[in-house]
């Protein structure tokens, strides 16, 4: 098959390939956007697919490097639209690297960050590809009568996107980990102010600990969750190869939620790391601005976050309706059918914290589902009711995802064999549980739509969690540097003057500043051209 030949050449670096899914303009504004139409008149003699007109934007390596792309486009056979499918499409001549006839291609220009990658635009006009260029492992268009064979599951075609989202969790955790390595190392070097005996390291201040250590716990949580999702992804892929497709939908939904929540929280965490470095945090010497610019793009690529949350929300609403009707639900949402206590049990056992996560997710999912049903009953159409309820639905998706992260973090920490390592990771886990529940307290304190009691948490329990969080901040302080050193990022990888492993920050910060292009000469040409005449004029005027 053609795509097998392309993959062989990619592995041998004979071809450079990129992926393409993003239309440059909304499909509603461009007739035929993202569509691939089969020309059935020529099907029997010379089968091919035809891009009548399509315009795309953003894929990495597309602008100047790639000579092939995997294009996601709607397949139309004999006038019937079968939805998105994947096609391997040649873009450039293999010898000259010039665009093929019917292909318009180029770089989109400077971005917020990540400018070492040539993200590009791509246009097709009356461009044909052979039938064999369609990826047909799970779906087929057969000769000679254009027969379309459906995939075993509607979301099998999403496997490439799900694969990327599954790996994005670990990648985002890495971005956050690098920013925190710089911020925590610098906080253990920088001294400012006094507490009792002379100047202290700024990491001794509780405010600095509260700014950084919960983010440190989140980064570990994301690392463990990313590992769990990748394992789940590989399990599902093996199941699909055996014809078992039961878990495809759940994998799609949980990776959608994780992609949205983790990228958003990672952006927040990197910004906290930057601000914790004071004025130096605004300097490129930290490499944190570049990290932020690269990481925050994750909120948009591979599915804009609001859209991802809405996809998960649809699954949650269906699950809530099934639970209320006494039907079975998926493992991801088993908290909807598990009996829950009317109030939180003892917080001295952190199992109570995990139950609180379950309760928060259950309350918000059922609240969003009930409100959607109420809006429909008021006369709104399905689409109108969904839009009027979108904020509550997104909240349900976020709370559900944070519950999933907490559970996976707990599972992995409990499985650590080394006792001393497990004790430190348990402190991180408990800090995470306290910090996240305090942040989510709204969902547990408000009057529930599904019960008559006022809230699940009491003010006394919230105060207990705060005090426990403060205790854990102080307990984790001596291990903070070791916890970031455990990631073993080299100075070459961090590219951060403030995050140097040897702690020699200030002398190297001075050397870094000396290398600025503006310091290659003491007097810039602009002085004689602009500043000097202006200063002379001002002096003459001052004499008057």
Image: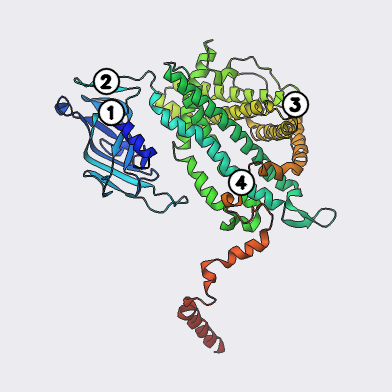
Q: Nearer the viewer, mark 4 or mark 1?
A: 4
> Which secondary structure, mark 3?
loop
Between 492 and 124, the one lying in front of the other is: 492
Between 331 and 140, the one lying in front of the other is: 140
Q: In this figure, which residue is indicated by the disc labeled 4?
A: 489
The residue positioned 68% from the left and 48% from the top of the image is 184
Instruction: Kindly check if marks 4 and 1 are in contact, taking CB atoms under 8 A apart as contact.
Output: no
Give whichever of discs 2 and 1 has the lower sequence position: 1
> Which secondary structure, mark 2?
strand
> Which secondary structure, mark 1?
strand
- x, y percent for residue 321: 50, 16
Q: In this figure, which residue is indicated by the disc labeled 2?
A: 148
Q: Disc 2 and disc 1: Cα gap in Å?
A: 10 Å
Between 374 and 471, the one lying in front of the other is: 471
Q: Disc 4 and disc 3: Cα gap in Å?
A: 36 Å
Q: Disc 1 and disc 3: Cα gap in Å?
A: 55 Å
Give whichever of discs 1 and 3 has the lower sequence position: 1
Between 92 and 264, the one lying in front of the other is: 92
Q: In this figure, which residue is indicated by the disc labeled 3?
A: 347
Name the residue at the right extreme.
197
Q: Nearer the viewer, mark 4 or mark 3?
A: 4
Q: In this figure, which residue is indicated by the disc labeled 1?
A: 75
The residue positioned 54% from the left and 28% from the top of the image is 229
Give whichever of discs 3 and 2 has the lower sequence position: 2
Give whichever of discs 2 and 4 has the lower sequence position: 2
Instruction: Kindly check if marks 2 and 1 are in contact, taking CB atoms under 8 A apart as contact.
Output: yes
Q: Disc 3 and disc 2: Cα gap in Å?
A: 57 Å
Q: Relative to 73, is 248 above or below?
A: above
> Which secondary structure, mark 4?
loop
Q: Quadrant of the C terminus?
A: bottom right
């Amino acid at each position: 098959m053609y795509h097998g030949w392309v993959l062989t050449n990619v592995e041998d670096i004979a071809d450079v390939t990129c992926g393409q899914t993003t239309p440059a303009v909304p499909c509603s504004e461009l007739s035929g956007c993202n569509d691939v139409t089969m020309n059935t008149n020529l099907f029997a003699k010379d089968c091919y697919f035809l891009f009548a007109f399509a315009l795309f934007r953003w894929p990495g390596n597309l602008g100047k490097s790639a000579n092939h792309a995997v294009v996601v486009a709607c397949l139309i056979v004999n006038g019937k639209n079968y939805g998105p499918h994947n096609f391997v499409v040649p873009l450039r001549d293999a010898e000259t690297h010039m665009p093929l006839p019917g292909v318009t291609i180029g770089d989109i220009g400077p971005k917020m960050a990540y400018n070492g990658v040539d993200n590009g635009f791509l246009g097709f006009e009356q461009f044909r590809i052979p039938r064999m260029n369609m990826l047909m492992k799970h779906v087929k268009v057969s000769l000679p009568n254009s027969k379309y064979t459906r995939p075993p599951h509607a979301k099998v075609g999403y496997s490439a996107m799900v694969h990327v989202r599954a790996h994005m969790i670990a990648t985002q955790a890495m971005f956050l980990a690098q920013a925190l390595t710089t911020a925590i190392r610098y906080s253990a070097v920088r001294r400012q102010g006094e507490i009792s005996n002379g100047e202290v390291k700024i990491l001794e201040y509780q405010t600095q600990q509260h700014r950084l250590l919960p983010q440190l716990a989140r980064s570990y949580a994301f690392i463990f969750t990313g590992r769990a999702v990748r394992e789940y992804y590989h399990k599902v892929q093996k199941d699909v190869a055996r014809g078992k497709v039961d878990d495809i939908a759940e994998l799609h939904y949980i990776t959608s939620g994780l992609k949205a929540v983790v990228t958003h929280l990672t952006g927040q965490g990197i910004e906290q790391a930057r601000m914790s470095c004071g004025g130096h945090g605004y300097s490129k010497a930290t490499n944190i601005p570049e990290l932020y610019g690269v990481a925050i793009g994750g909120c948009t690529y591979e599915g804009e976050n609001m859209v991802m949350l809405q996809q998960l929300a649809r699954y949650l609403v269906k699950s809530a309706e099934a639970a209320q009707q006494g039907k079975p639900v998926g493992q991801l949402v088993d908290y909807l059918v598990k009996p829950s206590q009317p109030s939180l049990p003892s917080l001295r056992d952190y199992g109570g914290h995990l139950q609180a996560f379950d309760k928060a997710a259950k309350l918000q999912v059922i609240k969003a589902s009930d409100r959607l049903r109420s809006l429909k009953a008021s006369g709104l159409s399905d689409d109108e009711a969904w839009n009027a309820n979108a904020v509550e639905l997104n909240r349900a998706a976020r709370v559900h995802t944070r519950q999933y992260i907490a559970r996976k973090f707990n599972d992995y920490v409990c499985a650590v064999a080394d006792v001393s390592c497990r004790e430190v990771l348990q402190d991180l886990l408990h800090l995470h549980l306290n910090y996240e529940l305090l942040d989510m307290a709204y969902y547990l304190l408000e009057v529930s739509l599904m019960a008559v009691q006022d809230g699940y948490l009491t003010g006394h329990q919230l105060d207990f969690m705060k005090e426990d969080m403060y205790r854990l901040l102080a307990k984790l302080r001596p291990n903070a540097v070791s916890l970031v050193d455990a990631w073993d990022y080299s100075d070459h990888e961090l590219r951060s003057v403030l995050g140097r492993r040897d702690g020699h920050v200030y002398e190297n910060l001075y050397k870094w500043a000396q290398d600025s292009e503006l310091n290659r000469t003491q007097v810039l040409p602009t002085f004689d051209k602009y500043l000097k005449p202006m200063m002379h004029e001002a002096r003459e005027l001052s004499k008057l």
